[in-house]
Amino acid sequence: MFAALRDALQRSALRTAVKRASSSSVHSQSMRWEEFAAKLRTLSLFSHTQTLLGILDDSDLELAELIRRTEILALDDRPWAVEGIGQYCAERCNQFGSSFRNLLRDEDLPNWSIGVLHTGVGIALAENCLRGVATRAQKTEIDVRIERFVTLCREAARPGYVGMAVECLGFVSRFLHPRVIPFIDKALLPQNNGLSAFFWHGVGRAIYFLPSNLSPRRSAPWRAFELASCEAPDPRTLDNMTAGLAWPFLLVNWRRPEILESVLSYHGKVLACSNAFSSGLSAAMIMWLECTDGASDIRNLLQHQPATDNDLWHHLIRRPCEEAIEVTYPKLTADNRLDALFRFPMT
C-alpha cells in the first residue's frame, strides 16, 4: 500500500535534504522540513516493523511476544510499530488461510497495545478486501467485498473496537482506490451501526499522508483542508473527514506545537465554526495516552503558550483536549466504546 511512501524513505537525496533543511535559518522552511521528517519517521516505524524488530517472514512467535520486542524502541515510537505488527499478523492469516476469529482476544496482550493492533489488522483486512478491485466494478461486487470486510472485522475485533478496524477501510481506499470511495460508502449503509462515519474519518486521516501532500513544498496546512472540503459529499461527512485529518496533525507534530499554531493561523476561524477539528485532536490525544499506558509526554502540548492567538489555542486545542481526557475518556472506557474515538462526534 505504501510503496510510493516507502520509496521516499529510501531516497538518500531526501534524507540529505532533510538534514540540510533542518539547519536552515529560515524558521518557516525549517518547520516544514521538520514536519516532513516526522512524517517519514512515522511511516518508517510502521512500514519497516519487521526489520526494526528482527521479525522473520516465517516467524512463529506469538503476538504477545512480538509486542514485547517493541520494548527496545522509545515509548512514543512503540504504537507505530505495534500497528505494523497488527498488519503483519493479519497478512499472515490471509497468506495461510487462518481464521481471524479471536485474533486480538489473547488475554496476554498488554492493554496499551489493543487499539493500535486493531488499526494494523484493519489496514491488512482493507488491503485484502480491495485488492484487484476495478475502478468500474459492479455494485454487487463492491457490496460483497464490503460485507466480507465488515464480517472479518467483527470476527477479529474485541467488543468496542470494531470501528477502529472499519475506519482503516477509508484510510486504505483513499490511498489505493479513491474512485470507488462513493460505492464503498453506499455498500456500508446497509451495515448500519454508523460504520459510514468511521469510513469517512479514515478517508480524512489518509489525506495528510498522501504523496501529493508529503513534500515540504506542498505540505502547507491549507492544502489538506481544501482537499477534504472538495471531496466531502455533505457537511456531516466533512466533519468526519476533518476529525480524521486532525489525528495525524496532532500525533505526528505534537513535539512541535508551532506546526499546530500554523494550522490555526490559516484555518482557526473556520475550524472554530465546528467541533470536528477539536474533537479529532482530543480523540487522537486520548488514543495516544491509551496506547502508551498514559506515560507519553503528549500532555505537555496542553501547556504550550502560543506566540500569536492564545485564545484560539485555548478554544480549539487546550480546553477540548483537557475536557476529553477528564470526562470523555473515562466514560468511553467504562462503556467499552473506545472505537468512538475514530468518528465524529465521539459521544
Image: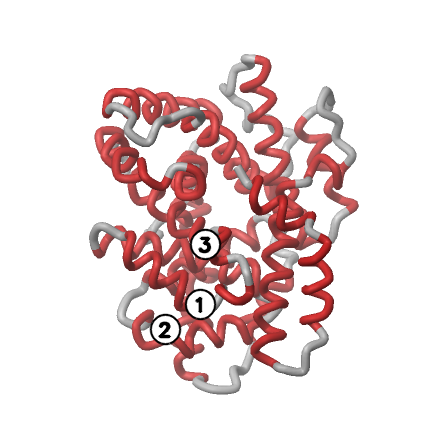
Give the quarter of the image for residue 177.
top left
Instruction: Decide which of tag 1 and tag 3 comes sooner along the chain.
Output: 1
Residue tagged 1: 221
| Label 3 close to label 2 by CB (< 8 Å) | no
Residue 86 position, x and y percent, is: 59, 33
**Residue type for callout 2:** His
- Which element type, helix, strand or loop, lies under badge 2? helix
From the viewer's side, name the closer residue of 239 and 129.
129
Instruction: Decide which of tag 3 and tag 2 comes sooner along the chain.
Output: 2
Q: Nearer the viewer, mark 1 or mark 2?
A: 1
Query: Could you give the CA–CA distance between mark 1 and mark 2, rounded to whole angstroms?
Result: 8 Å
Q: Is 220 placed above or below 135 here?
A: below
Query: Could you give the CA–CA distance between mark 3 and mark 2, rounded to whole angstroms?
Result: 27 Å
Q: Which mark is residue 118?
A: none
Residue 34 position, x and y percent, is: 63, 67
Residue tagged 2: 267
From the viewer's side, name the closer residue of 45 and 133.
133
Instruction: Decide which of tag 1 and tag 2 comes sooner along the chain.
Output: 1
Residue 222 position, x and y percent, is: 39, 68
Count neighbours of disc 3 (C-alpha within 10 A) and say few if under 14, some if 14 to 19, many if 20 or more.
many
Count neighbours of disc 2 (C-alpha within 10 A) and say few if under 14, some if 14 to 19, many if 20 or more.
some
Give the quarter of the image for residue 229.
bottom left
Q: Which mark is residue 329?
A: 3
| Label 1 close to label 2 by CB (< 8 Å) | yes
